[in-house]
């Protein structure tokens, strides 16, 4: 990357909220319905229809504001942002402008190169989404576009950061942290493919000794962490080339093209005054009481950092394990539920991070759909710790549990997988193995004691893995040396 310039990045993230209904009407927010099946006079923008604010949206905004250290405004205002587009039937979007519900927050991030730093959050405001245009691609529909207004009026939070990030890596660290927080808070499902968490990046560069910000380009249409990194890096190079050649960067909105990793000009960037914002006369000012804020604060779930610290402190887990487990709240909750029933945190962590995650990845399913629930896994781990089965046999049992959803005990019983601890039975096998391998016995007695591994292996094989390894070792040493 060109090092003559300092890179300056600010991010605007749109978070789609998980409320069951839209922000100003009772229509469903479910994804993937028949076009225009989830609409009513309010979200269709029919004349005379009046918006009614969804209380849940306000609560989610307060929750997000508190989790990011924002001040919650006791009084905020909805405003009309006026522009024309066919997916916006009212001709304006209801948003917040001068008095947003949350301001002055912060998020701590960490990157390998930049270390730890704090990124300021300028504001968080509530707004409605627009509908979407579907472009015809069959012989009948080619050249036509259709408006689907199911998404119109879907509640969004727009989270605007300060221009505090200095590299694509810092931007990604910020986005991942924010993504983790809104999913932990339960206000967003986090799906980037479905557009529930999307980001516009404002990118500019300036010579290192320059105080004022350079002219920025706003990058739109980026729907994965990888693409955001690509888009920013491409944009920095593009702007550096312009400045190197003595040119001037123009303020504009640029679209990211994921097919070749470049950005291209979409339109000149509007200024706020182009939108003719004014307070929406159909909505009264929103008043949030101190009691309401305190109630929401009291109900905040444990956030990622607090959970991670608890896993290290209370469970004695290595920090690495805690980070892996806490990356996804559902995985962390599953782990908590296993430990609650089987008080051996490190063993539980190994199984969740190992076998459970491996199977989830293989089948590309979420932990909430895992056939082996937390209580079932705890039941299996109990049988390892009380020596009913070995760790190796446990993997076979786990595989069976995954297929059938049965309890470990039932499978161990049914398949006869109980570890043999009965000395008599093991002794019979040990004797047979010694009798069958006279030359190895001779070498062992001649000083080649490493061969003990061979004998243990033979006995375990004969017992189909069920002999207690400790007993096997003990008996072999006694008989070979005796
Ligand atoms: Zn509606």
Image: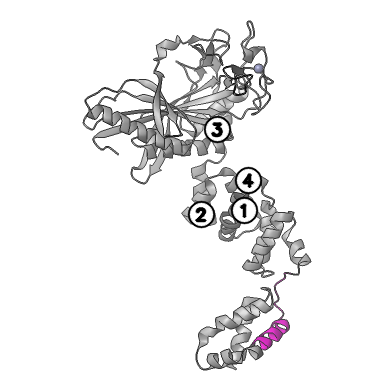
Alpha-carbon span between mark 4 and mark 2: 21 Å
Relative placement, left or right, of 25 versus 316 is: right
Viewer-side residue, 65 vs 9: 9
Alpha-carbon span between mark 3 and mark 1: 37 Å
Q: Which residue is mark 3?
A: 297
Residue placed furthest toward the front = 139
Residue 229 % position (x, y): 41, 37
Contact (Cβ within 8 Å) of mark 3 with mark 2: no
Q: Quadrant of the C terminus?
A: bottom right
Q: Mark yes or no: residue 175 visible.
A: yes
Relative to 388, does residue 360 appear above or below in the rendering?
above
Task: Give the residues drawn in magenta, as a range.
Answer: 417-433
Label located before the other in sequence (4 or 3): 3
Viewer-side residue, 447 vs 141: 141
Q: Secondary structure at mark 3?
A: helix
Q: Which residue is mark 4?
A: 365
Cβ of disc 1 within 8 Å of ligand 1? no
Q: Which residue is mark 1?
A: 359
Relative placement, left or right, of 229 versus 331 is: left
Query: Residue at the spot x=72%, y=70% of the render?
Result: 418
Q: Which residue is mark 2?
A: 321
Q: Quadrant of the N terminus?
A: top left
Alpha-carbon span between mark 3 and mark 2: 29 Å
Query: Residue at the spot x=56%, y=38% of the render?
Result: 184
Q: Is residue 202 magenta?
A: no
Relative to 250, does residue 400 appear above or below in the rendering?
below
């Amino acid at each position: 990357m060109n090092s003559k310039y300092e890179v300056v990045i600010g991010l605007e993230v749109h978070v789609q909220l998980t409320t069951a209904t839209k922000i100003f009407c009772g229509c469903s927010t479910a994804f993937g319905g028949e076009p225009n099946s989830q609409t009513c006079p309010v979200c269709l923008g029919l004349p005379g229809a009046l918006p009614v604010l969804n209380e849940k949206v306000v609560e989610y905004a307060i929750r997000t504001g508190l989790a990011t250290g924002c001040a919650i405004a006791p009084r905020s205002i909805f405003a009309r942002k006026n522009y024309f587009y066919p997916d916006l039937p009212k001709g304006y979007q209801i948003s917040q402008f001068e008095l947003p519900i949350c301001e002055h927050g912060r998020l701590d991030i960490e990157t390998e190169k930049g270390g730890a730093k704090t990124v300021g959050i300028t504001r968080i405001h509530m707004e409605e989404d627009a509908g979407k245009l579907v472009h015809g691609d069959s012989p009948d529909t080619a050249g036509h576009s259709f408006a689907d207004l199911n998404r119109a009026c879907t509640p969004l939070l727009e989270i605007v950061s300060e221009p505090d990030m200095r590299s694509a890596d810092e931007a990604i660290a910020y986005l991942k942290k924010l993504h983790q927080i809104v999913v932990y808070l339960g206000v967003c499902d986090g799906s980037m493919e479905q557009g529930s968490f999307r980001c516009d990046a404002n990118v500019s560069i300036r010579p290192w000794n320059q105080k004022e910000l350079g002219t920025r380009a706003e990058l739109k249409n980026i729907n994965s962490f990888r693409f955001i990194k690509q888009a920013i890096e491409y944009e920095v190079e593009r702007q550096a080339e312009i400045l190197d050649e003595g040119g001037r960067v123009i303020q504009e909105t640029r679209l990211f093209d994921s097919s070749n990793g470049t950005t291209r000009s979409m339109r000149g960037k509007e200024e706020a005054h182009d939108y003719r914002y004014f307070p929406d006369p159909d909505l009264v000012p929103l008043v949030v009481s101190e009691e309401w804020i305190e109630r929401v604060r009291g109900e905040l779930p444990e956030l990622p950092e607090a959970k991670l610290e608890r896993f290290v402190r209370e469970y004695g887990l290595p920090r690495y394990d805690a980070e892996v487990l806490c990356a996804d709240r559902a995985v962390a909750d599953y782990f908590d539920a296993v430990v609650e029933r089987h008080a051996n945190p490190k063993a539980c962590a190994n199984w969740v991070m190992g076998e459970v995650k491996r199977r989830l990845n293989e089948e590309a399913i979420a932990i909430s759909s895992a056939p082996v629930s937390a209580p079932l896994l705890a039941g299996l781990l109990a049988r390892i710790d009380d020596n009913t089965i070995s760790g190796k046999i446990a993997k076979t049992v786990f595989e069976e549990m995954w297929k059938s959803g049965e309890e470990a005990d039932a499978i161990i019983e049914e398949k006869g997988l109980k570890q043999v601890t009965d000395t008599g039975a093991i002794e019979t096998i040990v004797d047979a193995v010694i009798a069958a391998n006279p030359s190895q016995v001779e070498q062992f007695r001649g000083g080649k004691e490493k061969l003990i591994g061979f004998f243990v292996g033979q006995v375990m094989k004969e017992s189909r893995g069920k002999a207690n390894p400790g007993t096997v070792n003990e008996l072999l040493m006694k008989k070979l040396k005796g």
